[in-house]
Amino acid sequence: MRVPGVTVLLSGLLLGCGTFDDPSTVKDLRILAVGAEPSEVILNVATDADLTRAAIPPLFLSPLIANPIGLPVTVTISVCANDPAAASPPNNGTDPTGYPAGGARATVGSALCDGDPTQVLLVDGAEVSMDPVTPLPVTLTPAWLLGAYQRDVFIGPDGKLHGGFDLGMPVVFQITAQAGNEKVIAVKRVLFWLSPLRGDQTPNRTPQIPGLRAYDRRDEATAEPLPDAIQSLDSGTTLEVGPGGLWIEPVAAAAPTLTAEAETYVTATLDRLTGQVTPIDVEESLTYTFYASAGTFAPQQTSSHPPPGITPQGRLHIESKYKPPAGGGAAEITLWIVVRDERGGASWQTRSLRMAAP
């Protein structure tokens, strides 16, 4: 199966040795996530030749950009086809034998669009806002999409061609944000299908975070928050955080349960021995990533599903512990909590904390 929601972030050169900053602390210009609506498209055409008459829906990309320097931000977006021969991103758990990136049970390649023969500029230096995030419309033509399908092809174990036409095709959007002399790049992928794998296949629904809660104390045995310690972390309000920090937990709007509803979805898998492409049902896993303008989160990322081979005792904990910066110095702190699914869906919540007086 293909995993289109991989985001690659690049931000200049790393100079010298020493200790790296905690990745949950945002000190420079960064693209923390990119929302796509829709994040998956089913075209309902019989063959790739029918793409010339396909109705391609308008797409909107929303980059979540942290901008500590405060200068105006411009965004450029280009698009290119998936390259199944490109190297896979590191630490993605794929087969080390060199199976094509984008093949079954492997993620898409990590290559940028730079220099790709299918690259097209869609948005050139648009000035954007961060509050609220500016959605940027992008348009793909049937002719371009046909060329992308023709590029996303590799030879499977059966000696036959496979790729975007039978496994789903990730379209690669390269987003460049610039503020002053700082520039960062993110890669966002949207999955396209020629036609439904089965009659019950539906496009991805973007996960949401209905609410957040915070607490500074919890039961040491169960890791459950103590009832009198729970505070609602609402939009437009600012909670106070002491030196001991706060647990920040995504929750449903009305009850302390998992925030976003994980879907069961249909995708295609390619048997590496037989070359047979088969529709399968997958239970979606949601990933939560935590960022702060000062201080740190640990762990930075949590999941709605346990790692393979692990059976959780009790409910899965998706909260993260926020620790304010030592010695204070940051009166107002911005938090970003991002939720992602496995098909490119992403959304987020932004909140504020205030350092407690010494």
Image (cartoon, rainbow, N blue to C red):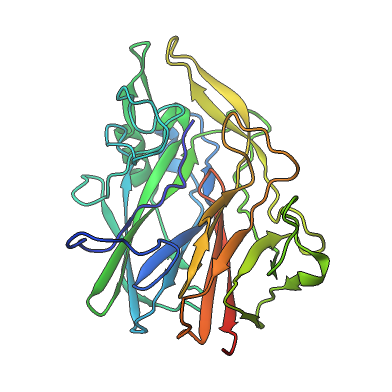
* Residue 146 vs residue 32, the one in the foreground: 32
Left or right for 114, reference 210: left
Residue 145 in picture, x, y percent from top left: 37, 43
Along the line of sight, the residue nearer the viewer: 94 or 136: 94
Q: Is residue 55 above or below residue 272?
A: below
Judge whether 325 appears above or below 123 on screen.
below
Kindly identify the residue that appears in the image at 22 percent across and 77 percent down: 181
Residue 146 image-quadrant placement = top left
In percent of width and height, residue 109 lies at 33, 39
User: Looking at the picture, how far across and down is residue 221, in whole percent?
Assistant: 74, 50
Q: Does residue 47 appear in the picture of this structure? A: no
Q: Is residue 148 left or right of residue 310?
A: left
Residue 240: percent from left, percent from top: 64, 82
Image quadrant for the C terminus?
A: bottom right
At x 66% / y 77%, what residue is drawn?
Answer: 235
The answer, for residue 202, to whether it is visible in the render is yes
Q: At 39% across and 45% down in the image, what residue appears?
A: 171
Q: Quadrant of residue 242?
A: bottom right
Q: Nearer the viewer, residue 146 or 167?
A: 167
Identity of the residue drawn at 76% across and 71% down: 229
